[in-house]
Image: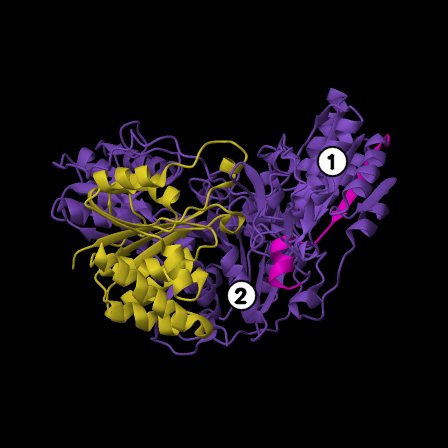
Chain colours: A yellow, B purple
Amino acid sequence: MDTTRLIIVAVGGQGNLLASSVLGQAALLAGIPVHMSEIHGMAQRGGVVESAMVFGKARSPIISDGEADVLVGFEPLETLRSLKRCSARSVAVTNLAPLAPFTVAIGQGTYPDVEALQALIRQKTRRLIAMDAAALAAEAGNPRALNMVLLGALIQTGVLPMTAEHVQSAMRTHTKKAFLESNLKAFDLGFAAAGKL
Amino acid sequence: MHKLLTDDPGRKMMLLGNEAIARGAIEAGVAVATTYPGTPSSEISFNLFQMSQESDLYFEYSTNEKVALEVAAAAANAGVRAFCMMKHVGMNVAADALMTLAYVGTKAGLVVLTADDPFLFSSQNEQDNRYYGKLSGLPVLEPSSTDEAREMLIYAFDLSEQLQEPVIFRTTTRINHSSGEVTLGAITPPLTHGDFAKDPMNYVTVPAVSRQLHVKLLKNYAKALELSEGSTYNIVSGQGSGGIICNGVSYNYVLDAVDDLDIADRVKVLRMGFSHPMPAGRIKDFLKTCDKVLIVEEGEPVMEEAVKALAQEAGLTLPICGKRDDLFSRLYEFDPGMVRRCLARYFDVAYTPPVAVDTSDVPELPMRPPNLCAGCSHRATYLEVRKAADALDMETIYPTDIGCYTLGLLPPLSMADFLICMGSSVGTACGFSKVTGKKVIGFIGDSTFFHSGIPGLINAVFNRHNYTLVILDNGITAMTGHQPNPGVDMSVFNLEGYGRISIEKVVRALGVDHVTVIKPYKVNKSIQAIQEALQFEGVSVIISEEPCALFAQSYKLRKKRAFFISEACKNHRDCIDQLACPAFYIEAERVKIDAAACIGCAVCAQICPENAIRPVKAAG
């Protein structure tokens, strides 16, 4: 069994850890060994949360620079910041709705132009899938389902060894019942949007 | 029911390393568990705290790590299994107890877990606590994976009982915070009641007793060495004349690298799981079959130095390398690519590393450092202390302490000047004020004050120091994830049977002459009270009381009421420039408030020169 390496980056509060936990469960359902690690120090205080997931035979729970097969960014600036995790053969999936860091508000730096940001990522990776996941989550009836939109887009790429059905089953058992319907819808919208790109 | 209490041996679950360790404690029949919370260990204790509410387990958040170890040591010496867990620097606090406890030993199993933090993801240093094994003479066990952590913890209790001494269980962040598949074992119901058989000539460590106990410790060391020699946790895999010795999470990187480089027929790997005492015989035998050896260990060259000494004893001259400029560093954590590269270099394997994308043309990106939350009361207190000191034209030094409020070091608050360890604000304030003649204002949180602030304050009163201590009392141990501390009203957690200590009463009882309690969301009143405290000659204490904004939100302790910036705004931006609350953002060159983030503390409204910031309700 080959090894597939996934990095998810997000801003604290965007639901990265739930997304990786759903993917972990989906892998378990699919009978695929998975090791994952997360750095969530100070996540609740607006910092960056990064999860690494390694599917397949490898045992290491973390991923070195240049070794991610797929990078998913829940926030465009953070996708770009983590680009060194990718190589020319990586696939990148990103949300396009910015969450400007506070440093921008107090004049320490400027938020990069989102068009230019996409061009940079597209030019350096095998494929970029970019969408306004926040808008799709709102369309699904739950702005917090941005994570599920991006899971849908991620699964559509076919890079991971799991199917949409595995992930949907994991969502049924590992997300809150009250949000299940909107989460599933968000997943479908993300999946469909990625398919059109 | 708590998921870790699932009594279904053989069932597979995806667990965080820390959950697997907590499960291991339940399977080992632990009766008493104690801790002071600290990342990366906190989820172990939090799960045990939760489970104690629906099982026979006794769990406590102790005042600090030393007290936690003392509670556990007594329970274990009275015959019940006890588990004490902490982050790596917590071991320094517990070390006084640990060093002599190693002499006294234990009756029932006693395991002390230290969670080390290579790369300092959330710590003030990256000390390597394997040295505590050497320093104390106690055995050290180190798991390499989530499932092994569960199972090895159970063995740690057995080993402790076999040797009648505490066992050190050492993890690192990547074990604590990695998830993997775990196969549940059987739960052992804990033996919760014990008895203490008096035996002062073995338990009361006066010099004459300790001289004998030290002999016993060395005898135990010899026994532990014998067990380590035969331990199945010290395993060899692969074949060939190249040798690798590794431990902990690095074992995974090594196995993956051997696979990726396809050198399983050229190198063999010795994984040290029972890593102290080092199994001298096993290692010498291993060295004899190798022509060169690479040591792969994060942190200090603990194994490397031991292995080199063993080679000397065995008269072997083969190359043994680990920490070297072109191999491994003593700094930070390892990663799979780094280990693969070093293996290829050391064993002369042709290897082209994957090329990371070139990011040299990516523009400089704005940073996203962690920040005090929207509405955090610490931000209000910092602003008020600054305004009070400025109004009095005081030159200030701000010793700080460990907690969320350390984030006050970031601009524009810039309210942190010196920090070394838990409680250090109170002690270092004495030294700074004594020799500089400047106004010294220390900051410490409620939990940290209980942990190790009190002795420093006693010192200040006794030695007649002259400074102001601000106790930032947000009613919870916030930084590590909202754990209780002795000042917390436990009814918030729906828990009964706890005491509650008033910080104000403690401070007054210590003889502090000027004590003020402020409510930091009341800006002008607070500034006035702070000015009085700053002008007091001697030790003054300000207790700033306001629940943690995040905690208050999750436990519905306060009503949320968002504010907005009205037309009256003249764009002075005092709100952003002085407070920098993350609820603010800029849109079309105007300051706005994110109503979803704003909790309605109204501190910005009180400092706005135009009174332009108003509650959303009043808008209608």
Q: Is residue B77 left or right of B529 when viewed as pictured?
A: left
The amino acid at mark 2 is Leu
Mark closer to the chain start, 1 or 2: 2
Within 10 Å of the Cα at label 2, are there few (<14), some (14-19), or many (20+) other Cα atoms? many
The amino acid at mark 1 is Val
Residue at 79% x, 38% y: name it. Answer: B527
Q: Is residue B347 left or right of B434 when viewed as pictured?
A: left
Residue annotated with mark 2: B48
Give the magenta part as a residue range. B536-556
Q: Chain of mark 2?
A: B
Q: Residue B563's x, y, as percent?
A: 65, 51
Residue at 17% x, 56% y: name it. Answer: A2
Q: Chain of mark 1?
A: B
Q: Is residue A168 left or right of B32 when viewed as pictured?
A: left
- Count of residue discs: 2
Q: Is residue B419 visible?
A: no
Q: Is residue B463 visible?
A: yes
Q: Residue B393's x, y, as percent?
A: 78, 23
Q: Is residue B540 magenta?
A: yes
Please, is residue B417 above or below residue A142 in the view? above
Mark 1 and mark 2: Cα distance apart in space:
39 Å
Circle 2: element type = helix
Q: Which mark is residue B385?
A: 1
Quadrant of image for the C terminus of chain B = bottom right
Quadrant assignment, res B149: bottom left
